[in-house]
Amino acid sequence: MSQSNHIGEKLKKGRIAKGYTLDYLQQVTKIQKRYLIAIEENKFEELPGDFFIKTFIRQYADIVDVDLNEDNLNFYNLDSSLEPPVKETNTDDKERLTRSQVRKNTKGLAFTYNSEAKATLATLLVLLLFILILGMIWFYGFYNRDNSIQPNQSIINQTQTVPSQEGTDSEEAAADTGITQINQTGFDLEAPVYSVTQLEFPSTLVLDINPTGDSWVRVDIGDETLFEGTISAGSQEEIELDNNIEEIVISVGYLPSTSITIGDEQVNLPDNIETTESQVLTFQIE
């Protein structure tokens, strides 16, 4: 049995040994129960996104005190590990695929598209419309407010780029005064990307977890992991940011209870945190 086929069984044994129920794990980790069941049954394709498989498995293992180092989590290569190994066959065996088998495979693909792809497309369209409305509200509110920001004060906003003369003048003024600017450049529903300019180093990254629930968090800078673990509700984790940082990647297991502060300013999190609780936020330092 491969590592990927027995890792769920190992986690399940660890949970039973601890005396934990799936409902308890759902409450502690904020991972939905159906995803916990999928992990225990090695049905990783049912998890919400490819990059969350490792995250959910690590969080599960942390809670039940199961060491997965020996299992080498690099087994998780989505292009191959979630599919059964392909046996080598000769040319004659490959030619034995009948028309009925081809029709069966085609029907399976059509069913998957009809039952899942259409539902996903409808959800995406609703979310895009919601984001567009929020962007318009923000645009009119931002340019009508009284801007009384001091030259050395950091500003962190989640914004869409608007091709207007006012936006260009505002950015040029910010560059002249040395104010930190953070603009969202990638709008993936589960992995938003931010562009950070004029951030002064050394600085700090603060992770605050409010009383609504624990949250698993991982902070990566390049190939180095600065922090990884579950932060208890009402707790705080402070991380020092040294010079020569080009990118900060923050993976959050339960975004509704998590706030992120870079320097002296709190980041405005995405609007879809209630529907997409687990996200990976990337900050590109320029």
Image (spheres, helix red, strand yellow):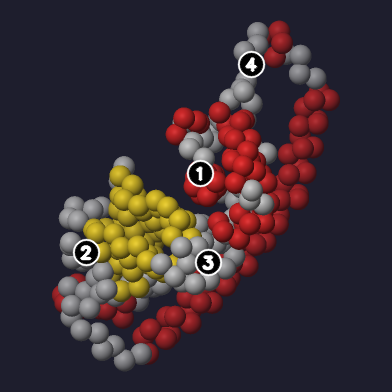
Instruction: Work out how far the residue at label 4 is from the one at label 2, CA to CA, in angstroms.
Output: 53 Å
- Left or right: where does residue 100 sit relative to residue 196? right
Residue 170 location (% of width, % of height): 27, 78
- Neighbourhood count class around disc 4 (C-alpha, 10 Å): few under 14, some 14–19, many 20 upward: few
Amino acid bearing label 4: Lys
Q: Earlier in the sequence, mark 2 or mark 1?
A: 1
The residue shown at (76%, 18%) is 97
Instruction: Work out how far the residue at label 1 is from the one at label 3, CA to CA, in angstroms.
Output: 20 Å
- Give the residue at mark 2: 203
Amino acid bearing label 1: Asp
- Left or right: where does residue 44 sit relative to residue 186? right
Q: Earlier in the sequence, mark 1 or mark 4?
A: 1
Whether residue 112 is situated above or below residue 85 in the rendered picture: below
- Give the residue at mark 1: 65
Residue 152 location (% of width, % of height): 18, 78
Select label 1 or label 3 by which is in front: 1
Amino acid bearing label 2: Ser
Residue 128 location (% of width, % of height): 56, 66
